[in-house]
Amino acid sequence: MTRSHLTFEEEGETKKDRKKMSSDFKLEIDGEEPLVSIRNGNVEQNERGGTVHRLLSGIRNQGSKSISNFLTNAQRRALGDRFFRGNQTVNNGLLDGDETREHGLGRKTGPILSGTAYCISSCSMIILNKVVLSGYNFNAGISLMFYQNLISSIVIILLGLCRTVSIEKLNWKLIRLWIPVNLIFIGMLVSGMYSLKYINIAMVTILKNVTNILTAIGEVYIFRKRQNQKVWTAMFLMIISAISGGVTDLTFDTLGYGWQITNCVLTASYSLTLRRIMDEAKKLTRSGSLNEASMVLLNNLLSLPFGVVLIILFGEWAYVMNADVIKLPTFWVIATASGLLGLAISFTSMWFLHQTGPTTYSLVGSLNKIPISIAGILLFKVPLSPPNLFSILFGLFAGVFFARAKMSSKPGT
């Protein structure tokens, strides 16, 4: 790499010396990768071709102005260029104190902000669904799912058009491969809606532990993955908490528990099926990958035609058209907010996972059940007995213990 050095010792140097230095400067910049090093005024800058061209143009335009004045301007421009580029280093590649503090602050606040956003969106989504289905006594869970997925699809498409997110172009082969996953996804959403209608939020969060049990068992038989002793112990504790919670539940509803068990089976099936076809799905995309936004759009878009069919089959269309609740503006506000929160969960979880890691994400997901359960009990005034409260707390502890047991066998954050 050719390097030219301009060293100006005094302002009173001879005209001949100046011409010679100017000539030397011209010869040096014809090199392959010219650099300029200015060492006058305690400032040293290294700028490539474009900056050298500007320096030469400045020299020609100076006329009777002194070389030292020109250098002062050149230094100022070079410093400005470096400031706005933001990718040049100062003091031999080290960041200055202010920039270091900014980066350190970002590393500390990033996981906190993303984790808080994930927890808030997750809690709010469950609570708002409970308000729509139970508070407004809305008996059309499939229609609510359809509306939420429609909102999510529109938002993702708009984000894709604005180039805020990257979305893979869908093709028939990918859609055909994804249809079984999407059917399970629809069943998972619908069963979750109906279970929330009949069961209090605290018991729903405890019964969701059954999903972890089914998923762990599926990993053993489908993926031949060995679970450690702590995982099996945690699963046993979760089974005990689910049974004791159901027995002591003062608001026990057979239909609601049936929907929730169905939801656990479908959720575990969705997770396991998604793992099996993910690699094959990536091969059917142009980029060879399938990001979170593309999967969310694929699920939500494909669910719309199936949702229409289910709405007609279950007679929800006539119910929705004649329901008084749809005339309330607050109902539509809450239903729309729940749809946006469903989408927010996808993006905040991806953000949080990127900021931390799988282990922290899994643990926070388990800990997140605690505020959800407490909020559900307080907001909806759920009647509790001491045995039922103990079983709920025991189930929350078992969920956290399960997350810790799963993390103990794999590296993480």
Image (tube, rainbow, N blue to C red):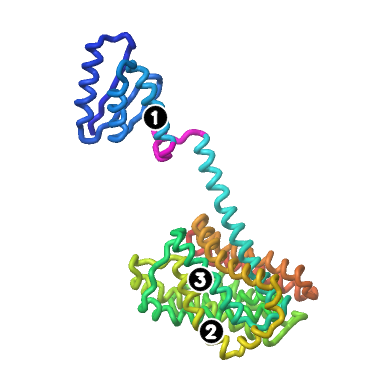
State the image coordinates of residue 169 (x, y, percent, origin top left). 38, 69
* Mark 2, other Cα within 10 Å: few <14 / some 14–19 / many ≥20: some
Assign the N terminus to one quadrant of the image.
top left
| As drawn, 121 above or below 238 | above
Amino acid type of the residue that numbered disc 3 sits on in the rendered structure: Ser
Residue at the spot of label 3: 153
Q: Is any atom of residue 244 visible in this view?
A: no
State the image coordinates of residue 209 (x, y, percent, origin top left). 61, 74
Instruction: Compare residues 133 and 398 and report the one nearer the observer.
Output: 133
Could you tell which of marks 2 and 3 lies nearer the N-terminus? 3
Which residue is located at x 54 percent, y 63 percent?
A: 349
State the image coordinates of residue 95 (x, y, percent, origin top left). 45, 36
Instruction: Compare residues 211 and 191 and report the one nearer the observer.
Output: 191
Query: Does residue 267 appear to the left or right of 68 in the view shown?
Result: right
Residue at the spot of label 2: 308
* Mark 3, other Cα within 10 Å: few <14 / some 14–19 / many ≥20: many
